[in-house]
Image (tube, rainbow, N blue to C red):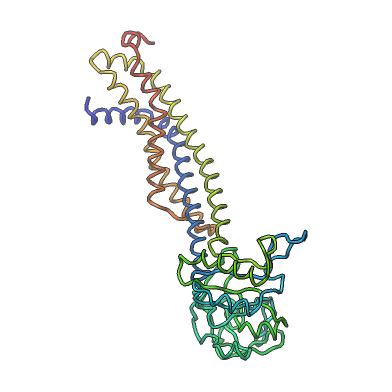
Amino acid sequence: MTLGNTLRLAGKALRRNKVRSALTMLGVVIGVASVIAMIALGSGARSAIDQQMQSQGTNVVYVSSGSFGRGGGAVRGGAGSINTLTLDDAQVIGQLATVARISPGARTRVQVVAGNQNWNTSIEGGNEEYVVIRNWPIASGANISPRDVLVADKVCLLGATVARTLFPDQDPVGQVLRVKNLPFRILGVLAPKGQGQFGDDQDDFILAPYTTVQKKVMGITYLQRVLVSARDADDVERTAVDITRLLRERHRTTGPEDDDFTVRTVEEMAQTRVEMANTMTTLLMCVASVSLLVGGIGIMNIMLVSVTERTREIGLRMAVGARTRDILSQFLSEAVGLSLAGGAIGVTLGLLVSQVLTRSLGWPTLITTSSVVIAFAFAGAVGVFFGYYPARRAASLDPIDALRYE
């Protein structure tokens, strides 16, 4: 029997019991749709993390005062809690061969007022290199100048959220706002960046010279952190290692348990989130695979019932010359046909569910061609695996016994 005849007979048999075929496919439909949606959620989460990593800056290494290590039997405080990071440390870091730029910094929360508007936000200290390191375009106005840093001038750049809140209907550039009753002249407005890798609003802050934040806002002489940009992406890890070694020499610490500073790369900061996303994707994929497995068992069950119902038909076909492989291929084609049809509907449903999740809940999803191909191929494999036993059972029937079957 030709392949075309086999497929035609298989299709005719499936159409003979349309409701039963549809219900049998339902398990595969749900399983494949779940697989597609879960892969889309996992891929979307990883893509969002990648975008957030890019928004953190170019080849960035974060050096912060404080550490979570244990030294002398006591737990050290977190980043920014110890005042041993100095401007001299930052300048020496800037002399490393793999370092392209540095921006010393300090950060605190402040209440800001402009006209009849007020807002509680963060003020970040940096220098003229801050926006370059963070790869942060200036939407309007000008950047902080080296002179502003040198004289601790009261000037600032506004994040998009602060600008929109304090100056809803006007251009902030050139205007004045008050930070802790200190007048700051607005030099420019930063382009919006959106959500950070920890869910925070990156645009809800004010950038000012770090000397101004140190001396006039916080009243400190030490640094809370230093932003470092490596010369090349391949130098980021080496730069982090060199900075760690350098600061241990300067601060006379011997190992992680004694460090009074923290050195982290953007990749390290995002790694935990990536691992969590991968774990959740794997867990959800396992749940979705169970649905597909149940759908496969349903196919096997219905095919066994079909073999029993069509025993006389099988005996008659064998009596008129049908070979064992003809019977085997027909029943296997029916099982695979059910599975592939369910897979096609499931892929469509999975794509629809992914779009609904994105539009209604705002969850990032990413549909890839490979995920569609994998889910569809998996559906076909389920049909072959669970359809083979019923098909083999049908093919192994004795023609005489089959003809006598009532």
Q: Is residue 361 above or below residue 160?
A: above
Give the quadrant of the N terminus: top left
Give the quadrant of the C terminus: top left
Q: Nearer the viewer, residue 227 or 306?
A: 227
Number of callouts:
0
Residue 284, percent across and down?
A: 54, 45
Q: Which residue is drawn at 39% across and 22% down?
A: 390
Q: Residue at x 37, y 10 (%)?
A: 405
The answer to whether residue 134 shows anywhere in this view is no
Residue 378, percent across and down?
A: 41, 39
* Left or right relative to 230: residue 321: left
The answer to whether residue 356 shows anywhere in this view is yes
* Left or right relative to 220: residue 15: left
Quadrant in which residue 242 is drawn: bottom right
Q: Nearer the viewer, residue 157 or 67?
A: 67
* Left or right relative to 402: residue 161: right
Quadrant in which residue 13 is drawn: top left
* Left or right relative to 347: residue 329: left
Residue 63, percent across and down?
A: 61, 70
Q: Is residue 34 above or below residue 69?
A: above
Q: Residue at x 30, y 26 (%)?
A: 329
Residue 185, percent across and down?
A: 60, 90
